[in-house]
Amino acid sequence: MTKRFAVSKNLFLRPSSFIHAVDDVSFQLRRGESLGVVGESGCGKTTVGKLLVKLIEPDDGRILFRFASNPVSSHGDPAVDPSLLRGTALKDFRSRAQMIFQDPYESMNPRRTIYDIVSEPLSVQGRGSVMDRVNRVREILTSVGLAPASDFLFRHPHELSGGQRQRVAIARALVIGPEFVVADEPTSMLDVSSRAGIMLLMQQLAQDLEISYLHITHDLAVARYMCDRIAVMYLGKIVEVGETEELLHNPLHPYTKALLSAVPLPNPGHRRPPPDIHGDLALPIVSASSGPPPRCRFYDRCPMATDRCRENPHPASEEKAPGHLVACYEA
Amino acid sequence: MASDTVLEVKDLSLTYQIRQGEVKAVQDVNFRLDRGQSLGLVGESGCGKSSVANCLMGLLPDNARVSNGQVILGGHDLLAMPEETLRHYRWNRIAMVFQAAMNVLDPVYRVGHQIVEAIEAHGIGSAEADSRARVAELFRKVGLDPQLMDRYPHEFSGGMRQRAVIAMALSCDPDVIIADEPTTALDVIMQDRILRELKGIQGDTDLAVIYISHDIAVIAEVTDSVAVMYAGRLVELGSTAEVLTSPMHHYTAALTSSFPSLLGEKRPLTVLGGEPPDLVSPDPGCPFAPRCPAATEVCRAEPPPAVNRGGHWATCWHPNSLHSE
Amino acid sequence: MIFRRQMSAPPPAYGGDDSGFGRAGFLLGRLALAARSFRQGWNIFVESRLGVISLLIIGLFALMAFSHPVLMATVWDQATYDPVTGYAFDQVEQPAPPSWRHPLGTDPLGRDVLSQLLYSTRSEFVLGITAALVTVGIATVVGAVSAYFGGLLDAFFMRLADLVIALPSISLLIVLSALFNLNLFYIALIIGVLGGFGGTAIILKSQALTVKVKPFIEAARVAGGGHFHIIFAHIVPHLMPLSLLYMMFTVTNAIFAEAVLSFLGLLDLRMSWGIMIHTANTGGYLLGGTKYWWLVLPAGASITLLCSAFYLAGRALDEVVNPRLRRRSD
């Protein structure tokens, strides 16, 4: 029983040029697993998350979900491609795949109460009576640590602290019992002390509820605590995937190495060498006719680039160690 | 040694007037900054660290009032100065690198021109050509190509804008620079470069820098000493190495241990429960007592005493012992 | 069982027990919240003095509207005081200046001016509020829908709005009222439709565009909300502040337009403030300077006062419902 995704090549249409936000990306996520997607801003990690919960549609490629129980599938294959879903089948998908948004301030309608916000997935899908929903919302608020729940039901988001608000966001994503959750930087806008609380809560809920997470983050240290595996993205491409500890302690791709060596350590007196990388991050804008230049995406900034990297197309992923995939000619 | 002190903040308290009453945003903050030294001001949002910075720069909003204290810069109390002298004094002696570089640069003027204006407004450069030469020098100093002077801010990347803002802060040769979350909006690789740049500039001159950040790792790497703030009060002050490796205050301890570690041993995260206290009508005791694991009766009833262990200073009834595990 | 999967750990494991919270508790909570938001809103409204003054003025006019049938049933006799068919037999000369029996005098046809003024107030309210509701109803839906869907639908509504704005509305109303026999309800409807598809729709659309890009709209989509749900549960509530403001402006517009049309004698109404001025004008009394002030001043002042009261109430309400103007303090 695995869940299989194969997202490929997404193009955002612009009049005469494209931004390759996500380009030919493939990965798999197992049931109950947490996969971290790490990269700098603009690398396409949030786009991957939005593709997976059908906030945007891929231009090419397929996303396949194999859920634990799947009453809507018809042709024997239990896999579901969300881009083909309409009507009740789409609503059913919405109750299995949810998302936690980055910004706990902007991702909640300021005019609605906590009850309205958390019960929204239930009410728009017509689940249960009003009292069923009230009880369910109280149950889920309690389990995300907002107790006593009845104190929170009729408050507005602006009356809560950032950490409390992100707990509400988690409650909203989990209230309908999803099997897969995209968490888009759920801790990046929180203070240090509430961040640890949210991280522990998500770990515990993932264990209790067997939820598969796609955890989008720019912070490798957060990914280390939250994820079983990590995928590093650069300009719309996944350049390296591996088990968390293996990837952090034995990075193979030069970009991963640079990222790791750029993270400051809370260890006074420790002197880090400067990260080995040139230049600035560019936007992957290419003209509609010619497509991206046929070479490694990381070529311009790579410290170990060779002629081979310039003359050949972007390298395919290779398994360098068990479960450790790298897309690099020189690694 | 006293001659080396470039900035001294004494008993600074300030309040904001809101509908519900007076918010005691900063209370009795004391610290000293020596020439060429860097100080980190750490705390979570709402702890008052940005209020302190804005007070030093004279950028407080209308509803703020400094109720007590002195800010002594080069022997003069900034808070007792008339507004007119203050304005020149401030940019020339103390400058600020703002958090949102995008909002500091005016989108309709060329970047170089904006720095030239800052120089001329404070009477440093005499001729336009001199000022431009000075800007080119500043650009080189912060790692920007001087040819970029005549570009507009939107043509700069986030990292380049932040460098331009640093160049602007350096333009009048200040003694002190306040860097308010200078790298929060940047990616790690760019953050690393900017911090190295700032450190390099600081090492070359005898510039003193105050870093304001919520990120302990950044503070650990770039500062000589750290001041930890909680609920408007300074709770711990000392050399960076001592404060972060053997914190005396339990809040500092909680902050450092709630920070996920990237490499090495994967420490379990500790969670600090509860919420920061109400600053309108604070309780009499230690502001951290409701969340503190070591709190006792006396912590809730009376304000904590200052404990000084050879320059490492904290306000706590039950400070952690020197080498506690 | 309404949920496919239940929490595997029982809720008490996480601590926090609040049993005894049933249907009554839920309803009470909602009610308390409504009361609290109303109280907060009221406090902010009261703080702006203009809001209170405008509310007092509107209240005064409402009182006037109610007082007419009461006065007719008690102290005023039909033959003398009817606003249209009455005649002041006690006066020798018409129009007669204010007196004890006729506090605002009589008009050239011997009718009591105060009675006319009070009688008209009711129809002005009906007209203004109908037009405002129609405008805001249409404009909110048009604005939200064009912002949310974009594309052809948006293009169509926006070109339509351009067309409506380009048409001079008073002239259009003059033409329409010359062609058709317009009564109060039709005039309200026309003013409402013109406002709703015109400028108000564009303003509400631009507001809707800023709401559409908020992450909570994406969150609602992930929750499974359809287009209808997102438009009416998330976008429209954010248009309400502006809607309310424009509702007030439309009331002002409608009363003003009615006055113009009545003044030109183009409306099929029994009596209105515009008709009162029209009567004075056709008798040539407007030329008499201030000598016949009681023929013009009461109606004119009422138009100005009621229009500005609605406008000011709109501004004060804006402060209540617009969170950006509210002080963030709790």
Image (spheres, coloured by chain):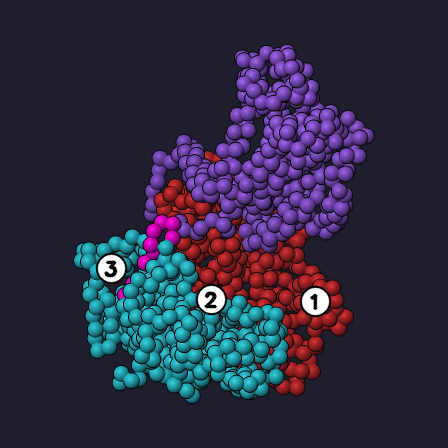
Chain colours: A red, B cyan, C purple
Percent x, y of residue C323: 50, 48
Marks 1 and 2, how far apart at CA: 30 Å
Q: Nearer the viewer, mark 1 or mark 2?
A: 1
Q: Above or below — where is B105 with respect to C186?
A: below
Which contiguous range is marked in magenta?
Answer: B18-28
| Numbered disc 2: secondary structure | helix
Q: Which mark is residue A18?
A: 1
Residue drawn 66% across and 41% down? C139
The reply to whether discs 1 and 2 touch (Cβ–Cβ < 8 Å) is no
Please, is residue C169 above or below residue B278 in the view? above
Q: CA distance from mark 3 to mark 1?
A: 57 Å
Q: Nearest the camera: C263 or A24?
A: C263
What's the residue type where badge 1 is placed? Phe
Q: Which residue is mark 3?
A: B286
Q: Which mark is residue A223?
A: 2
* Residue drawn at point x = 42 percent, y = 47 percent: A141
Residue contact at pointers 2 and 3, CB within 8 angstroms: no
- Residues indicated by labels 1 and 2 sit on the same polypeptide chain: yes
Residue C322 at what x, y percent from top left? 52, 47
